[in-house]
Each structure stands twice: as structure tokens, then as C-alpha cells.
């Protein structure tokens, strides 16, 4: 429960002071809750659920559900953006009880994708090129990656993925929440 409550706050980009303002619960109580030093009361859970726009049953279900040990290829979701030439497979999808996920990406030759800012500031990523060539720009720094190369970093700013080659660029990304 403590880890999930902390994760919900971080995903929204809220500080403990922000959450205290949304819930009317003291910063110190919220801090103790996130460190698992106290157990939440029903009233405290109700205030948290209101702040996040969640039902209590949803929060409790996410905390109690164990992630599957095996994610079968048939269950891995694939998303394609035909216009940009980008394919994304969620190999090991996010789960409330876990902090990391594994994604496989493929960029068609000439494909170019820009993200203006990270979904979660400070999120750790590892980009491993499985085939082809990938130009990865992280917060203004350009990295040219060849097959087998791995780039690891924390996301603080915008990113760009570009395939400068004449064959598809395949890569894996490990995403780790802070």
C-alpha cells in the first residue's frame, strides 16, 4: 500500500506538500504512510482516493493483485503509428506492484519521433539497440547507437528517437519509475 500511494503521488508530479493540500492530511502523516510506518485508516484512504479521483476498491485491488510471472507473447499489446513508422510492443507491461517495464520498439527507416517532456521526471531508462541504427537525443544530447549499444539515463527533459539508417531500427527500453 505504501509503495502504491507514493507511486500515485510521483506519477502526478506532486510533492508531499501538494498531496497534503489536496487531502487536508499533514505532510508528516503522508510521509509516514509512504514509508510504511503507519497503516492508513479508512478516512485517510478515502481522502487519498478523492484526491486521485479513484474508488477505494480500485486502489485496494491494485495493491492486492500480484503481477503475472509470465507475460505470454499473445498477451503483449502492440501499438502502431503508421504515420510515423513506429511500432511499440509492451513486453512486460506496467503493474502497480512493480516499478519497471520492458518495451520493444521499432522505427522504420527515416522515422523521427519527438517527446517534448518526460511522462515522469527523473524516470530511469535503458535503451538497448537490437538491430539497425538509432539516433537518440536526450535533453539536447545526441547519441548515435548501433546494434548492441545500450544507453542508460534519467529523463529530465525532451527526447527524440530517429532512425537515420535504411533498415528498421529495433530496440528495447527498460523503464524504471523513480
Image (cartoon, rainbow, N blue to C red):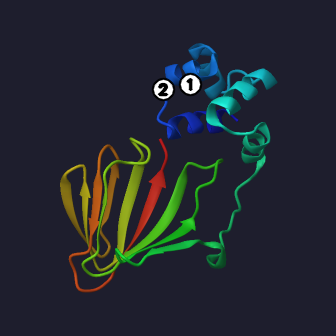
Res. 15 visible in picture: yes
Residue 168 place in picture, x, y as percent? 32, 82
Figure check: 170 above or below 155: below
Q: Is residue 120 left or right of residue 109?
A: right
User: Image quarter for residue 47?
Assistant: top right
**x and y percentages locating residue 150 in the rendered image:** 32, 64
Under circle 1, the secondary element is helix
Which residue is located at x 75 percent, y 27 percent?
Answer: 46
Residue 130 shows which numbered tag? none
The Cα–Cα distance between marks 2 and 1, rounded to whole angstroms, is 6 Å
Which of the two residues, 163 or 32, is positioned nearer the viewer here?
163
Q: Is residue 109 left or right of residue 83?
A: left
From the top left corner, tell me how far across and down residue 89 is, in percent: 51, 72
Residue carrying label 2: 15
User: In the image, what residue occupies the spot 77% across and 41% down?
Assistant: 60
| Picture quadrant of residue 4 | top right
Which residue is tagged 1?
19
Q: Is 53 left or right of 114, judged from the image as shown?
A: right
The reply to whether dot 2 and dot 1 touch (C-beta < 8 Å) is yes
Residue occupying image coordinates x 70% and y 35%: 1
Crowd tier of the residue under label 1, counting other residues whose Cα lies within 10 Å: few below 14, some 14–19, many 20 or above: many
The image position of residue 32, as x and y in percent, is: 63, 20
Q: Residue at x 19, y 51 (%)?
A: 140
Can residue 35 be seen here? Answer: no
Amino acid at each position: 500500500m505504501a509503495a502504491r500511494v507514493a507511486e500515485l503521488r510521483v506519477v502526478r508530479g506532486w510533492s508531499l506538500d501538494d498531496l497534503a493540500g489536496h487531502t487536508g492530511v499533514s505532510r508528516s502523516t503522508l510521509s509516514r504512510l509512504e514509508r510504511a510506518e503507519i497503516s492508513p485508516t479508512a478516512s485517510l484512504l478515502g481522502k487519498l482516493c478523492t484526491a486521485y479521483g479513484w474508488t477505494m476498491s480500485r486502489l485496494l485491488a491494485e495493491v492486492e493483485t500480484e503481477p503475472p510471472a509470465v507475460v505470454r507473447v499473445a498477451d503483449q499489446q502492440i501499438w502502431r503509428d503508421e504515420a510515423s513508422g513506429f511500432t511499440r510492443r509492451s513486453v512486460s507491461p506496467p503493474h502497480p506492484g512493480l516499478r519497471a517495464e520492458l518495451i520493444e520498439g521499432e522505427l522504420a527507416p527515416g522515422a523521427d519521433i519527438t517527446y517534448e517532456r518526460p511522462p515522469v521526471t527523473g524516470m530511469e531508462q535503458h535503451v538497448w539497440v537490437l538491430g539497425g541504427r538509432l539516433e537518440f537525443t536526450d535533453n539536447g544530447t545526441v547519441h548515435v547507437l548501433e546494434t548492441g549499444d545500450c544507453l542508460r539515463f534519467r529523463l529530465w527533459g525532451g527526447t527524440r528517437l530517429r532512425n537515420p539508417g535504411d533498415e528498421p531500427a529495433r530496440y528495447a527500453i527498460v523503464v524504471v519509475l523513480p
